[in-house]
Amino acid sequence: MSQENKPLQQQVNIELPPEQAEGTYANLAIINHSGAEFVLDFSRLLPGIPRAKVYSRIIMTPQHAKSLLKALEDNIDKYEQQFGEIKLKGLNDPGRSFGFQPTSKDK
C-alpha cells in the first residue's frame, strides 16, 4: 500500500480520573438489546446476599458491541497464548447459581 493510500491514524488522548482508575469488580453481566442499542449492566453477586446492585451500565450501538466482542476475543487469545487456556469451571454444575454464565448455545 502506498503512502497515499494508507488510512490516517488519529491519536486519541484518554483521560482516566482517579475514581475510575481503581475499577469496579463485577461477576455478573446482564445484557439486553433493541434494534438500536445494546445495554450491558455490570453487577456483583455475593454468596448469601439475595440482592445485587448494578455498579455500571454501558450503552452502545450494535456495531460497537460487535467491535467489543472482537476486541475481547483478540485479547483472550493473546492472554491464553501467554498464560495458557482459561478454564471455565462449573458451567455444567447445577449448584452454580451466580456469576457470568453463557447462554445454552455457548455451553
Image (cartoon, rainbow, N blue to C red):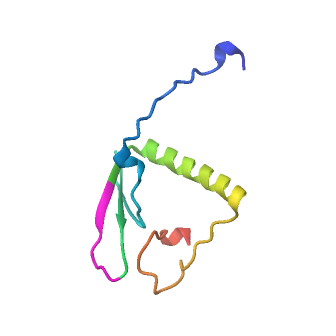
Does the rendering let one see residue 105?
Answer: yes
- Where residue 39 sits in the image (x, y, percent)? 34, 53
Q: Of residues 85 and 37, which is closer to you in this image? A: 85
- Residue sitting at the far front: 18
- Where residue 64 sits in the image (x, y, percent)? 45, 43
Does the rendering let one see residue 34?
Answer: no
Image quadrant where residue 62 sits: top left
- Where residue 48 sits in the image (x, y, percent)? 33, 83
Give the magenta-colored segment's residue range.
Answer: 48-56
Magenta span has 55?
yes
Locate residue 30 relative to residue 74 in the image: left or right: left
**Residue beneath the point at 59% across and 53% down:** 73
Q: How many marks?
A: 0
Magenta span has 89?
no
- Residue sitting at the far top: 4
The C terminus: image quadrant: bottom right
**Residue beneath the point at 67% across and 52% down:** 78
* Above/below status of 105 relative to 92: above
Image quadrant where residue 30 sits: bottom left
**Residue beneath the point at 72% across and 16% down:** 2
* Above/below status of 73 relative to 48: above
* Above/below status of 86 relative to 71: below
**Residue beneath the point at 46% across and 68% down:** 100
The N terminus: image quadrant: top right
Q: Of residues 13 and 92, which is closer to you in this image? A: 13
- Where residue 70 sits in the image (x, y, percent)? 56, 48
Locate residue 76 relative to residue 44 in the image: left or right: right
Q: Of residues 68 and 54, which is closer to you in this image? A: 54
